[in-house]
Image (cartoon, rainbow, N blue to C red):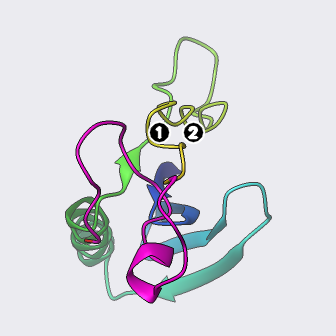
Amino acid sequence: MRRFEFVGGGSAKFWEVGQSDATVTVRYGSIGAQGRTQVKELGSPAEAAAHADRLIAEKLRKGYAETTVAPSAGHTAAPAAGPAAPSPRASRTSTASSTSTSHRRWRRCWPGPPCWPS
């Protein structure tokens, strides 16, 4: 199975997809959890491959990054150890006053110029 992960915006999610003949299996959930599995039967292996490719393209557009480790001789593909540690700059919180609603939305700020909500 190919594994993709998305870490950002307060979420840490994984998504995996695999194909066997005319069947596409998708597993997804929070990183560290078992996740949920969905199985879809298609008409032919070619249709299943095309379906899996469409799903992968959609996840890549949404910002997911593939974390599948390329198989080596005698080994099967396995997910990477985990998501990369976030930048220390990205994890700092704003020191601005939290008395207004707009300041409360500025949870993660870069040092230097003011942070603007996205």
**Residue beneath disc 1:** 67
Tell me which secondary structure the magenta stretch mostly adopts: loop
Q: Which residues are magenta?
A: 95-117
At 57% from the left and 32% from the top, the residue drawn is 85
Q: What amino acid type should be assigned to the residue bearing mark 1?
A: Thr
Q: Is residue 42 left or right of residue 86?
A: left
Q: Nearer the viewer, residue 117 or 5?
A: 117
Quarter where residue 106 is shown: bottom left
CA distance separating discs 1 and 2: 8 Å
View extreme (top): residue: 73
- Vertical position of residue 9 compared to residue 86: above or below: below
- Vertical position of residue 12 compared to residue 70: above or below: below
At 64% from the left and 21% from the top, the residue drawn is 75
Q: Classify 10 Å Cα crowding around label 1: few (below 14), some (14-19), many (20 and above).
A: some
Residue 64: % across, % down: 36, 56
Of the residues tagged 1 and 2, which is closer to the observer? 2
**Residue beneath disc 2:** 83
Residue 90: % across, % down: 45, 42
Q: Classify 10 Å Cα crowding around label 2: few (below 14), some (14-19), many (20 and above).
A: some
Quarter where residue 74 is shown: top right
Q: Magenta includes 112?
A: yes
Q: Nearer the viewer, residue 95 or 62?
A: 95
